[in-house]
Amino acid sequence: MTGMIGVIGTFAGFTIRTATPADVPLLAALDRAKFGGAGMEVYGEEHFRCWLDVNPSGLLVATHAGHVVGYRYSQYLDFDLGDIAGLTTNAAFTDHGFTRRTHRAAGNSINGMSVCSSMPGAGRALFEVIFEQLRREGRRYYFGFARIPGFAAYCERLGTDASGIDRRQLATWYALGCARRVGGLVHDGVAFTANLRPREPEAPDPVLSKYLKHPGFGIAAVLPDWIEDPASLNVGVMVLYKNPDLAGGGASGAGGLRR
């Protein structure tokens, strides 16, 4: 797919194609409508224009009946599981969302930096295209950083039961509880280590569970202060998929998966 511009294919009724300059106002409006009301930072037209310049084959659009109903932007980079320990914030990892200084066209991995859809199924169709690209190009990992918008409400329900557990540990407990509920995978090295055991989440997180329901996706890290997202208490969860055609490929002790 590298360098391909135009229609890529049809998946589950959605046409997936690379974006054009004419799409920019629509994509910015879609992002604003989806995330602006949640108090999150949104990507404006300047981001989309930059992405078309930096990595045009990474900005994919989903259409249905001729209408734009979703997009996904990816940057490529060199990544190893050992790099997880150095992750700090999304802004640092993505050059404040612009990716000019972070994108590496020949990188071994794909970072799904942003995904947004207004119609059920559009996001999944975009995922399938990315996984196909991963295998075709022989890149090792696809990963993204999921919101956990059910986390703030979960903490509020816990009340004093959450006292004595720091935010990273409580978010880890929440994410692992979501994985248990949906049968999702968890990479080695992600564990809840606090002595207290709060109540399990009453329901799987509405965003994280969408990733974990896809075979092969696993939780790789829980990152406090990753994004600006009040509903997630600013926590991001790294979800990672290994190219099944490639063996090995990780730091020692971090490469396994467990349910």
Image (tube, helix red, strand yellow):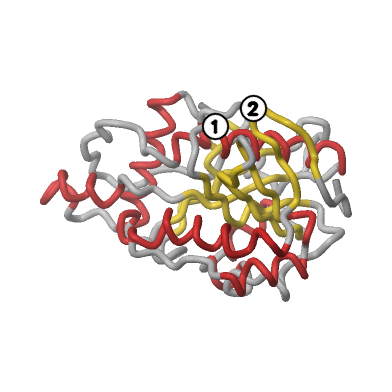
145 or 8: which is nearer to us? 8
Q: Position of residue 53 (x, y in %)?
A: 77, 70
Q: Against 216, is 193 above or below? A: below
Residue 196 sits in which quadrant? top left
Secondary element under disc 1, as helix, strand or loop, is: loop
Instruction: Residue under label 2, please give it.
Output: 13
x 51%, y 68%: residue: 89
Secondary element under disc 2, as helix, strand or loop, is: loop
Badge 2 density bin: few <14, some 14–19, many ≥20, Cα 10 Å: some
Report, in whole angstroms, how far the alpha carbon at label 2 lies from the one at label 1. Answer: 9 Å
Residue 236 sits in which quadrant? bottom left
216 or 105: which is nearer to us? 105
- Side (left or right) of 154 relative to 112: left
Instruction: Residue under label 1, please give it.
Output: 121
58 or 224: which is nearer to us? 58
The mark tally for this picture is 2
Residue type, numbered disc 2? Gly
Badge 1 density bin: few <14, some 14–19, many ≥20, Cα 10 Å: some
x 24%, y 39%: residue: 197
x 50%, y 55%: residue: 30
- Side (left or right) of 259 relative to 83: left
Q: Position of residue 247 (x, y in %)?
A: 81, 34
Residue type, numbered disc 1? Gly
In the picture, which quadrant includes the N terminus? top right
Q: Position of residue 224 (x, y in %)?
A: 41, 61
- Tell whether label 1 touches label 2 (CB within 8 Å): yes
- Side (left or right) of 202 relative to 234: left
First in sequence: mark 2 or mark 1? Answer: 2
Q: Position of residue 81 (x, y in %)?
A: 67, 51
- Residue extending furthest left? 160
73 or 257: which is nearer to us? 73
